[in-house]
Image: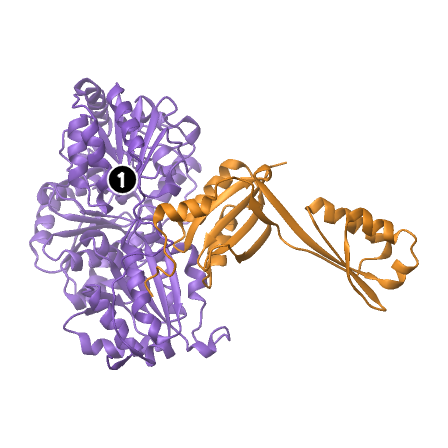
Chain colours: A purple, B orange
Amino acid sequence: MSAKITGSHAVMRSLIEEGVDYIFGYPGGAIMPVYDSMMDYQKEIKHILTRHEQGAVHAAQGYARVSGKVGVCMATSGPGATNLITGIADAMIDSTPLVCITGQVVSPLLGTDAFQETDVVGISMPVTKWNYLVTKPEEIPWVIAQAFYIARTGRPGPVLIDISKDAQFGELEYSYTKCTSIRSYIPRPKIDPAKIDEAAKLINSAKKPYVLFGQGVILGNAEDEFRVFLEKSGTPAAWTILGVSALPSDHPQNMGMLGMHGNYATNIMNNRCDVLIAIGMRFDDRVTGTLSTYAKQAKVIHLEIDPAEVNKNVNADIAVIGDVKETLPLLTEKINKRDHTAWIQEFKDLYALEYEKVIQKDFFPEKEGLTMPEVIHRINERTRGNAIFITDVGQHQMFASRYCRFHKTRSFVTSGGLGTMGFGLPAAHGAKIGAPDREVVLFVGDGGMQMTIQELGTINQTEAAVKIVLMNNKYLGMVRQWQQLFFDKRYSETYLMNPDFITVAKGFGIPGKKVMARPELDAAIDEMLNYKGAYLLEVSIEKEDNVFPMVPTGSSVSDVILEPQVT
Amino acid sequence: MKPIYTITAFSENHIGLLNRITIIFTRRQVNIETLTVSQSAIPGIHKFTIVVREDKDKVEKVVKQIEKQVEVLKAFYHPDEEIVHQEIALYKVPTDALLSSTTLEKTIRRHNARILEVMKEYTIIEKTGHKHETQELFDDLSKYGVLQFTRSGRVAVTKLNEELLTNYLKEIGYQENGNNK
């Protein structure tokens, strides 16, 4: 029989068993035993002390999204735990595997309004895939094993483990067995071969098939399988904001981005195709526009691992439930090799129109002030599809999704479903930790930057070489754009009086430069990319810039607006 | 009026699972008419019986979300034709009022109710049946002054020839105590 160890040691040993190399966290009273044990495992696991728990959870998300591993974050009870909630909700809606460990008051005090007691299991229930309150030390190994298994399998998601302080102090006979199944949980649904046959038949008979792909391709590690399928089918393809980088940007069948600020052709063709093949995506309202006029002419094939997504927003004529890693090869085998050059040309013709009306002006603006898309375009030209791009939320996020180019998968990290401002800086930090050999460039606005600006301190401490491109238009730009277009130019509370960001960064030990005019831009980008450590490039941006094309809320995808109406 | 559906969900018996299930209804603004939790015919598996008044499309989506919970094995939904269902009601009535009545025997007989206890002050009557049946007895007893009334949630079993859960468990190769604990 093995010697007894404390619950807090069991936490650390269990994390090591699961291959954890980084914990993003913040200590406090109820998690102190684990932090004490942490000192004995510094060789195996590095802890990154963020400046706020929200910074810890977003960093864990960034880490998970680029590495494909489970992100781990840790916080104390009460406010520590509640500060994680935004990131957990973000991870839930974007299917990011996380294990969040929180300390809890000693179990006899549960429910007594003890100091720093919050019912975090209750609070996190709607935004976690699974959660559990541990009150006995002997539960720790199996709960952690189960947590990692649930977080990473099936449709991934965040899991929260709340551990009472007495369970951390108490002793157990420790042994660890990895979890390989839970009887009530089926991460990989059984594939119905009849559905594969039906789907193949429909694809083979289609005249204008159209593939929409999402993050499911990346989460299933199915990029190769997807590419093989796509090339055999000859079908044009477009991506959701979380699916980007699953297919190289320059692939001849990559037609661009879906959704509210996606490309022109990719939106319109939803309503012109005859067969819509949705792969690992969930028909978010930002993708479909108003459902009553969305793809009504098309037969829909939906490849999806989560049965609850099927028929949730768009009814599937054929639902192929299963992991796309398994279903795509089965489907590829059954489809005919096709060529849809003429159909792809229809996309290209519309793209040419979009290029002329929008993209050209975005990349090479005639106005004097600098614009977000031109900054992104210039950086893109330097990184040549090899960088990982992280964004915050707002106009710059839409420009970055539209214009960033990629060769490799897992190269774009953004808060898609939740739209969490303040996500960018900590997520970029976590991404750099998760992919230390890759260039990591963050695009962030002046609004979002100030929501988690304290994480500059964390970045300075870890010396992670995050390249921060702050696009400062002194406005909450996306809200301002909506006020201009839909609220009669009543700019309610969107102007920001900002600090001197360069001085702030300098105070945190991070060098930087502010660019005011076009002639300085290229040299400043070079300086940032060549600098060996973290760097802040602040670009002063024209405030009246808007993101187009646009599918206004409540509109049909075929009514995508290409350019602003002159009023 | 929207149709009635009976949702049955089969799950582990863990703390907090009831909450995980009810928030699915809350989030979609579906009112739970009645809810009963008990053990099922299979050892270790618990059964939720939830009655809602909602369109089929929405019920189907709710059921999928219930099934998605890690600790739920399987969930089904049924219109009333597919199930035999029952509720139980208890009525506490002043004994005086009953004794002075001339129609008590008739009322008890007509409703096929039972008297569980007679005390000097009060009498307890029990009736099982569908909701409208227990309601009718309540209405008839009202003239005597009902001191307390309570009605249970619906319990239900399917009238189908095949056992949906058993078939499903066979399909997934379910084993008792198959958890990693």
Q: Is B61 placed above or below B114 here?
A: above
| Residue at left offset 41%, top offset 44% | A491
Give the crowd class for mark 1: few <14, some 14-19, many >=20 residues within 10 Å.
Answer: many
Indicate the position of residue A235 as horizontal and vertical percent values: 21, 26
The residue labelled by disc 1 is A214
Taking the image as shown, residue A434 lies to the left or right of residue A284, namely: left
- Quick check: can you spot residue A242? no
Taking the image as shown, residue B49 lies to the left or right of residue A132, namely: right
Indicate the position of residue A353 as horizontal and vertical percent values: 23, 23
Looking at the image, which is closer to me, A258 or A146? A146
Looking at the image, which is closer to me, A370 or B2? B2
Q: Is B114 placed above or below B61 here?
A: below
Indicate the position of residue B26 as horizontal and vertical percent values: 52, 50
Indicate the position of residue A477 as horizontal and vertical percent values: 32, 44
Q: As drawn, which residue projects farthest toward the front? A: B161
Residue A298: image quadrant is top left
